[in-house]
Image (cartoon, rainbow, N blue to C red):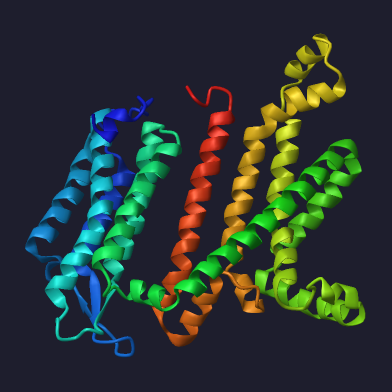
């Protein structure tokens, strides 16, 4: 039995004989990109600029023909959407993603001169655009098949393992791999610091946001003022907020020695956490408040008729029913914090943003990607995981 056969039977959103314009457009974009833009770039070393090569030169006729046929299958199946066609498109997307690192291996053997051991292969714009559009296709197919978010997350994880295996075993000339090997300890430390900052910020925001939502439910006047302040804080640019925090925190650390002993300073972790918590509060407070308020009054009345006290109704009825919407707030907050933490590197807080800004300063795009790709992967994993959990907790979510 194949993996596609093991997928749950979807409730297909039938579209009759009308083409799926979204998938059709995305497939045509990938075909145009494949045949017009550079697939890879080859440079003799890290300093010299690379030379771009198209798909025919990088993949050869067999590889280019296979990619073209798979993309054409997406186009053809988009004309008459059906359950079988969507499943075939899902298979084509997975195969394309899994074969892309094999294309890089082919480019290495076709284009890199063995006499140049320092030569580097850089992923070109065609590769990145096709990969991004394939992810969009995966989202569209998931929506049409109404699949749980768990399945695309599992498929993407499997494809990511194929990429990692190919990079570790056969792509030592890939510029991204070389950048990692030159900074492997710093990279692992940056990932740990990034996760630490995000975890603390989201954890504190969850406690504070839940408390504020409870106060807003109890005191009606408190609601307008709280949302006004949180909305205002959300409009402040992240760099500006980091700058505004620098002077007062430096003054506090200078005049209150015990704060300096605790690690409070104008730069570093403290202002980064304050800024991240500030930006994280609004989605958590808003989703928590709305989730608690939108629980059906008839359900609560039924619980009251069963003899439940006020506290029991809250913890056993209101909160469980509100949990899926509350988790959506946590999902939005966490994904937002993962991205914003990269900016915290500018004030010495560490994290993966360090590689992004160092790469920009050195005009080394592969170093930028070394910091940006893990952030993207973390955001996708968190989004899929918390989204799947929220769907599972929603009434009827597992049906």
Q: Is residue 81 visible?
A: no
Q: In this view, does 96 lie above or below 170?
A: above
- Work out which residue is located at the far bottom of the displayed protein and give it: 48
- Work out which residue is located at the far top of the displayed protein and give it: 306
User: Could you tell me which residue is drawn at 80 percent across and 54 percent down?
Assistant: 228
Q: In this view, does 363 lie above or below 334?
A: below
Percent position of residue 119, x then y:
24, 83
User: Could you tell me which residue is drawn at 90 percent across and 43 percent down?
Assistant: 221
Percent position of residue 363, x then y:
42, 84
The quarter holding residue 326 reads top right
Q: Which of 64 and 116 is in front in this view?
A: 116
Q: Can residue 264 be seen in this view?
A: yes
Q: Which of 18 and 166 is in front in this view?
A: 166
Percent position of residue 325, x then y:
64, 36
| Horizontal side, residue 256 vs residue 119: left or right | right
Q: Which of 171 and 71 is in front in this view?
A: 171
The quarter holding residue 144 reads top left
| Horizontal side, residue 44 vs residue 290: left or right | left
| Horizontal side, residue 152 vs residue 70: left or right | right
| Horizontal side, residue 327 vs residue 103: left or right | right
Quarter that holds the N terminus: top left
Percent position of residue 173, x then y:
26, 75
User: How many marks do you count on the picture?
Assistant: 0
User: Could you tell me which residue is drawn at 14 percent across and 82 percent down?
Assistant: 113
């Amino acid at each position: 039995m194949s993996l596609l056969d093991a997928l749950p039977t979807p409730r297909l959103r039938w579209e009759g004989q009308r083409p799926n314009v979204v998938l059709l457009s995305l497939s045509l974009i990938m075909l145009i990109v494949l045949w017009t833009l550079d697939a890879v770039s080859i440079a003799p070393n890290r300093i010299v600029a690379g030379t771009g090569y198209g798909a025919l030169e990088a993949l050869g006729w067999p590889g280019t023909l296979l990619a073209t046929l798979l993309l054409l299958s997406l186009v053809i199946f988009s004309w008459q959407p059906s359950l079988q066609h969507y499943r075939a498109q899902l298979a084509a997307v997975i195969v394309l993603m899994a074969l892309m690192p094999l294309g890089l291996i082919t480019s290495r053997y076709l284009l890199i001169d063995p006499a140049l051991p320092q030569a580097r292969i850089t992923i070109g714009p065609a590769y990145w655009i096709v990969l991004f559009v394939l992810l969009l296709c995966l989202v569209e197919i998931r929506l049409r098949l109404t699949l749980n978010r768990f399945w695309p997350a599992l498929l993407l994880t499997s494809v990511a393992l194929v990429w990692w295996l190919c990079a570790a075993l056969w792509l030592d000339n890939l510029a991204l791999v070389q950048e990692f090997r030159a900074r492997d300890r710093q990279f692992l430390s940056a990932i740990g610091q990034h996760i630490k900052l995000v975890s603390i910020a989201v954890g504190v925001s969850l406690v504070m946001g839940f408390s504020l939502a409870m106060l807003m439910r109890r005191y009606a006047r408190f609601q307008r003022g709280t949302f006004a302040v949180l909305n205002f804080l959300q409009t402040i640019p992240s760099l500006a907020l980091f700058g505004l925090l620098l002077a007062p925190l430096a003054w506090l650390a200078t005049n209150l020695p015990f704060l300096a002993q605790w690690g409070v300073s104008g730069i570093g972790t403290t202002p980064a956490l304050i800024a991240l918590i500030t930006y994280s509060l609004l989605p958590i407070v808003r989703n928590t408040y709305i989730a608690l308020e939108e629980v059906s009054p008839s359900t609560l009345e039924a619980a009251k008729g069963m003899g439940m006290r006020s506290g029991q109704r809250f913890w056993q009825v209101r909160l469980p029913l509100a949990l899926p919407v509350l988790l959506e707030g946590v999902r939005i907050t966490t994904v937002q914090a993962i991205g914003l933490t990269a900016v915290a590197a500018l004030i010495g807080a560490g994290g993966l943003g360090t590689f992004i800004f160092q790469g920009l300063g050195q005009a080394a795009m592969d170093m930028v990607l070394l910091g940006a790709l893990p952030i993207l992967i973390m955001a996708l994993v968190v989004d899929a995981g918390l989204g799947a959990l929220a769907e599972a907790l929603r009434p009827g979510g597992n049906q």
